[in-house]
Image: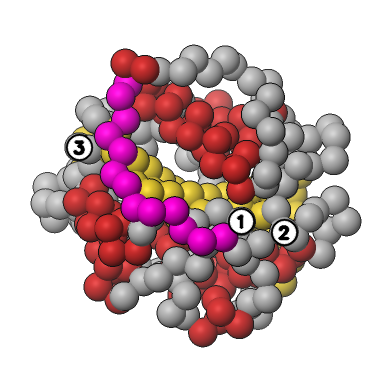
């Protein structure tokens, strides 16, 4: 299930060559729970296609958690998670969204300074490994065809859970077929000597002032990973709703205390989705249909 990383390349996405992505149906998610690595009972949401899955994607929420906090979707998977889940299920994949926050009594950590956050990447990494164990035990799953995907704090968790320098990662008998990190924080991984144990792709906006692109580009060069940089794009560029806005409540970022920008770029989102589809086809050895 382990694959060698491809040679490093920074790809500046050309939004003019946009591939049209049609709308997909909204798929329901069912509640699941399983034992975590630190004694907690983790909850999560599972989306399944109507036919046997062609592979499974474990998708990791960011610092805001899994759920919408306002509007008609309040308490449900937020629009970004639902949209990605719908797209993946439409492609024939199962999707598991593990919830690292609820069982720990945490709602969000975006507004907490790095040093004061209620949980960090150690907990996220353990949750990922527990999620992988759970998926591998399901009768509908092929343990050789499990991919990892995450956003922001969850993107950083993708790095943490595929780090070949971590004992618990290397003690895990299973490996992810591929790993995809949307706008992770790459500075810590760069400093710690991170080495991916599978193929890694990072997708990030050129204008991201929350988790900047430059450290990810440097990390990609250091570990032979693919880094796709989307022009005119900020954090959360793949959100299907909303516009770019200033998050003055976020104390971290490139300019601590001055807030960060986050919001949608529909063209970048469409290209990122197409890249995700291609990466999963390659990882799961599926033909392009």
Q: What is the tally of numbered marks visible in this picture? A: 3
State how the image is colored.
secondary structure
Q: Position of residue 289 (x, y in %)?
A: 68, 24
Q: Position of residue 162 (x, y in %)?
A: 50, 67
The answer to whether the residues at label 3 and label 1 have Cβ atoms under 8 Å apart is no
Mark 3 or 1, which is nearer the eye?
Answer: 1
Image height check: is 256 above or below 92? below
Front in this rendered view, residue 149 or 115: 149
Front in this rendered view, residue 246 or 217: 217
Left or right: residue 249 versus residue 143 is: left
- For disc 3, the marked residue is 207
- Where are the magenta residues, as a range? 3-15
Quadrant containing the N terminus is bottom right
Residue beneath the point at 61% across and 82% down: 171
Kindly tell me whether residue 109 is visible in this rendering.
no
- Asked whether 162 falls inside the magenta stretch, the response is no
Q: Earlier in the sequence, mark 2 or mark 3?
A: 2
Q: Earlier in the sequence, mark 3 or mark 1?
A: 1
Image height check: is 177 above or below 229? below
- Residue 144 disc label: 2
């Amino acid at each position: 299930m382990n694959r060698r990383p491809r040679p490093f390349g920074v790809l500046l996405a050309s939004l003019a060559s946009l591939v049209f992505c049609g709308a997909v149906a909204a798929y329901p998610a069912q509640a699941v729970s399983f034992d975590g690595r630190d004694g907690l009972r983790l909850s999560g949401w599972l989306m399944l296609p109507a036919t046997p899955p062609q592979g499974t994607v474990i998708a990791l929420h960011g610092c805001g958690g899994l759920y919408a906090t306002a509007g008609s979707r309040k308490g449900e998977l937020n629009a970004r998670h639902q949209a990605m889940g719908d797209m993946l299920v439409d492609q024939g994949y199962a999707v598991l969204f593990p919830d690292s926050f609820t069982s720990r009594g945490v709602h969000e950590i975006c507004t907490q300074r790095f040093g004061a956050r209620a949980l960090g990447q150690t907990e996220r990494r353990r949750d990922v490994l527990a999620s992988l164990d759970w998926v591998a035990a399901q009768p509908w799953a092929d343990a050789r065809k499990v991919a990892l995907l995450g956003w922001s704090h969850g993107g950083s968790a993708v790095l943490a859970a595929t780090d070949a320098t971590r004992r618990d990662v290397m003690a895990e008998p299973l490996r992810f077929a591929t790993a995809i990190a949307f706008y992770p924080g790459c500075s810590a991984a760069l400093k710690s000597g991170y080495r991916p144990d599978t193929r890694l792709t990072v997708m990030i906006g050129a204008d991201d002032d929350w988790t900047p692109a430059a450290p990810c580009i440097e990390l990609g060069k250091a570990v032979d990973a693919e880094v796709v940089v989307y022009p005119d794009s900020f954090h959360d560029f793949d959100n299907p709703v909303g516009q770019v806005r200033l998050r003055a409540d976020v104390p971290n970022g490139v300019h601590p205390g001055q807030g960060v920008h986050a919001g949608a770029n529909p063209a970048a989102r469409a290209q990122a989705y197409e890249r995700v589809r291609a990466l999963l086809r390659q990882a799961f050895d599926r033909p392009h249909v």
